[in-house]
Amino acid sequence: MNKHIGILLCFLPILLASQNTFKVSIHLNNLNGNKLRVGYLKNGKTVLDTLSSSKDNLVLWEGSTIDPQLARIEVLDTNLYLRIGKAVALPPALQFLLSNSEINIEGDAKEIWTASIKATDEEVNLYEKFRLQDLPITKELWEIQKEQNRKANAKDTVGSVFLKDKYNLTRKKNQALRVQFIDGNPAAFGSMLILQSMFLQLNINDLDKKFKALDDKYKNTQTGKELAIKIQNNKNTAIGQPAVPFVQTSFDGKTVDISAMKGKVILLDFWGSWCVPCRQSHPKLKEAYQKYQSMGFEIVGISNESISKGKSKDQQEASWRKAIEEDGIVWPNLLYDSELNDVIKTYDVMGYPTKYLIDQKGNIISKILGNSPNNHDILIKKLDELLLNK
């Protein structure tokens, strides 16, 4: 009897350890020696790992995750890429729920997004049911993108507007399906992860309402706590709210204090030296600055160079200063440093460029995402209303 207990005790640490790791077995036909790239979160940061296969096209991926998360797998086969000039678009990735469990993935490397997923964790299998429902939409979006790519390369603009409208309508189907899953599965961890991805689609009140409807057991996980903070930060930076103050030193050594700028119209411009659309917006911003500065307009740039992988802080600063000089930026500009002030998290910046317009009373009146002629027109219209027509 004691001998049996001893054996059980010896194996117990091994059993416990297996519950804290994941083992993903990936078997793909037509992989032809190409590598896989997996994207996932580790210690709060996105990690991209490259995996190689064995002779029988089997790829093993092992590790651990604190909470279940959505991971992505892509096949690095250049023959599958779409190209418009120098721009490259990759086929859809396979997105699945990754948890500390055994997961088996089987499919075709040429269409990895259609692979099947089976796991020992029911949370993974439940998310897989949602993914299979969404699969026809993924296929439809990819076909539209291929047609758009063909037309762009042929310089054929006939029907381009129709394709764009069709693409947007198809994306809305995906959005509706995600909302349906969240509402129908409040006790699924996948619902929290899907909700986490919908900050650009749902307004903050809907996000907050759906978060509160989720099972309480998940709200105390690391993911749940971070999502609660994200929702609160969105509330704090919603249209009509006072701008969240911060103080930091600009590239020219001067102190930038948002609170001290009250009475001016302020544009917070979140950008990066690595971000092409951000830097393409600078010439128009320079024109606006020249026109409106004397009327009480100020721009404060916040450059996030930490996205550039592998760069030291000194290298990040060098890239930032070089971009300021190359683009001829003369307005106050700050280098983002989460240790000094996590303004990116405070303002919940998820894409670049992101711009916040703040009125003379210190309230946020507009949030502008991306760089397009229409976005610039919106900014100029707001500046005219605030400074020319006051």
Image: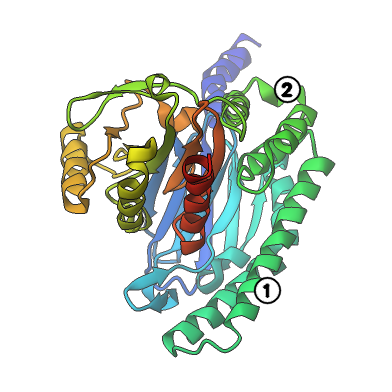
User: As displayed, is residue 161 above or below residue 181?
Assistant: below
The CA distance from mark 1 to mark 2 is 40 Å
Q: Residue at x 48, y 27 (%)?
A: 346
Q: Residues within 10 Å of mark 1 (few under 14, many from 20)?
A: some
Task: Tell me which amino acid carries mark 1.
Answer: Lys
Residue 119 x/y as whole percent: 65, 47
Closer-to-camera residue (8/232): 232
Q: Residue furthest top?
A: 2
Residue 281 x/y as whole percent: 36, 55
Residue 268 x/y as whole percent: 41, 37
User: As displayed, is residue 203 above or below residue 374?
Assistant: above
Q: Residue at x 45, y 70 (%)?
A: 31
Residue 73 located left or right of residue 173: left
Pair 1/2: label in front: 1
Any part of residue 139 in sight: yes
Closer-to-camera residue (187/214): 214
Name which quarter of the figure residue 115 lies in: bottom right
Residue 346 located left or right of residue 340: right
Name which quarter of the figure residue 47 lies in: top left
Any part of residue 129 in sight: no
SS state under label 1: helix
Closer-to-camera residue (5/266): 266
Q: Which residue is mark 2?
A: 217
Q: Which residue is mark 1?
A: 166
Task: Tell me which amino acid carries mark 2.
Answer: Lys
Q: Residue at x 42, y 20 (%)?
A: 259
